[in-house]
Image: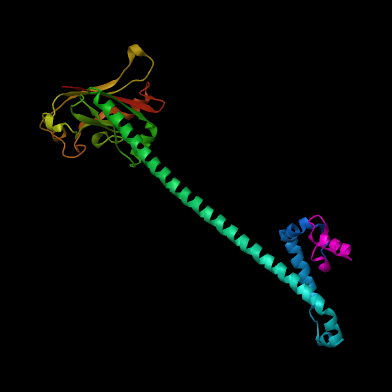
């Protein structure tokens, strides 16, 4: 008798003893050592299977009509009493484990969502910093570019070459009255000297409209105007360059104007660029520019030289 009790106790407690699933009565086919039983019961797939089996068993146990309730009455109730109690206990364990698993899943989801929000917040912050840095870099590059252009303009010593690209388009725009005039970047007579720019009307103005290219000089405001003598006086040479390869026989189109101090065009500017310019309404015939190579690769070169 003692051996039988020891054997029974060993089978119930030994982790390597053979065991069957608690849901065997409901159709679970699992068998294995007792050590693996708890893992089997906690496995999500197994839990879903057990829940499905339990639902099927519960459906079978439910009465389908009034006659089933009364059939064999008390005798069946007594016979199934102990089984129902066992089933209820197992069902309670399963539901309890399912609730625990659901809570664990909810906690895991909440943790993941919090981490996602943290990553998104850091990403937004990093994106904002990158955008700000990019704007600062673009501003610095623009400032640097303008500084280089300004230095080049100051160091030209009154001799400036203006390269006008896409000239055919500019001429077409002028004829269509879209953009009738182009202004060159500014240049200086010396590092601390007068600031000027050129204006070209590809389709002409006044008496040269539609037949000639018009070319003018405009005075501009600078930081050193207080140290300069006004009105401006001197000579200014304007040229449209012949870009042909014939070095000995280049035929630049050139004119030299002498400033007239009484004209508003040479007074100290009161706006960034003096509205009044001085130059030639009929500097060159439009058709002339098509001869030789005044236009090369759709580019026109205009040179100005200031003498004081």
Number of numbered discs overlaid on the protein picture:
0
> What stretch of residues is rendered in magenta?
1-26
Q: Nearer the viewer, residue 204 or 308?
A: 308
Q: Nearer the viewer, residue 4 or 273?
A: 4
In the depicted structure, whether residue 67 falls above or below residue 30 = below
Q: Quadrant of residue 136?
A: top left
> As drawn, is 145 to the left or to the right of 272?
right
> As drawn, is 231 to the left or to the right of 36?
left
Q: Quadrant of residue 286?
A: top left
- From the top left corner, tell me how far across and down residue 70 is, in percent: 83, 88
Q: Nearer the viewer, residue 14 or 82?
A: 14
In the depicted structure, whether residue 80 falls above or below residue 122 = below
- From the top left corner, tell me how far across and down residue 3 is, in percent: 88, 62
> As drawn, is 87 to the left or to the right of 238?
right
> As drawn, is 60 to the left or to the right of 173?
right
- Residue 44 shows in this picture: yes
- Residue 280 shows in this picture: no
Q: Residue at x 88, y 64 (%)?
A: 4
Identify the image's colour scheme: rainbow, by chain, secondary structure or one colour: rainbow
In the depicted structure, whether residue 199 falls above or below residue 190 = below
Q: Residue at x 38, y 27 (%)?
A: 299
Q: Quadrant of the N terminus?
A: bottom right
Q: Nearer the viewer, residue 200 or 142?
A: 142
- From the top left corner, tell me how far across and down residue 68 is, in percent: 83, 84
Give yes or no for residue 249 being in the magenta stretch. no
């Amino acid at each position: 008798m003692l051996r039988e009790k020891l054997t029974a106790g060993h089978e119930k407690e030994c982790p390597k003893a053979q065991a069957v699933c608690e849901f065997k009565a409901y159709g679970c086919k699992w068998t294995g050592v007792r050590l693996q039983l708890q893992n089997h019961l906690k496995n999500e797939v197994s839990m879903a299977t057990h829940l499905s089996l339990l639902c099927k068993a519960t459906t079978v146990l439910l009465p389908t009509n009034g006659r089933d309730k009364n059939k064999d009455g008390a005798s069946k109730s007594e016979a199934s009493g102990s089984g129902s109690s066992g089933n209820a206990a197992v069902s309670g364990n399963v539901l309890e484990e399912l609730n625990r698993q659901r809570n664990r899943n909810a906690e895991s989801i909440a943790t993941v969502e919090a981490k996602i929000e943290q990553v998104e917040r850091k990403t937004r912050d990093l994106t904002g910093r990158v955008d700000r840095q990019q704007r600062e870099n673009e501003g610095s590059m623009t400032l640097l570019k303008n500084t280089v252009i300004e230095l080049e303009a100051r160091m030209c010593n009154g001799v400036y070459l203006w390269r006008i690209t896409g000239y055919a388009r500019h001429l077409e725009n002028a004829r269509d009255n879209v953009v009738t005039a182009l202004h060159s970047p500014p240049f200086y007579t010396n590092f601390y000297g007068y600031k000027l720019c050129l204006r070209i009307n590809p389709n002409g103005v006044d008496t040269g409209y539609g037949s000639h290219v018009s070319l003018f000089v405009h005075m501009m405001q600078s930081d050193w105007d207080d140290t300069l003598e006004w009105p401006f006086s001197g000579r200014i040479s304007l040229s449209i360059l012949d870009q042909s390869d014939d070095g000995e026989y280049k035929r630049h189109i050139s004119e030299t104007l002498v400033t007239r101090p009484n004209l508003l065009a040479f007074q100290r500017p009161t706006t960034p660029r003096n509205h009044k310019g001085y130059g030639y309404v009929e500097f060159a015939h439009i058709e002339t520019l098509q001869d030789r190579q005044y236009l090369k690769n759709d580019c026109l070169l205009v040179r100005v030289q200031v003498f004081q």
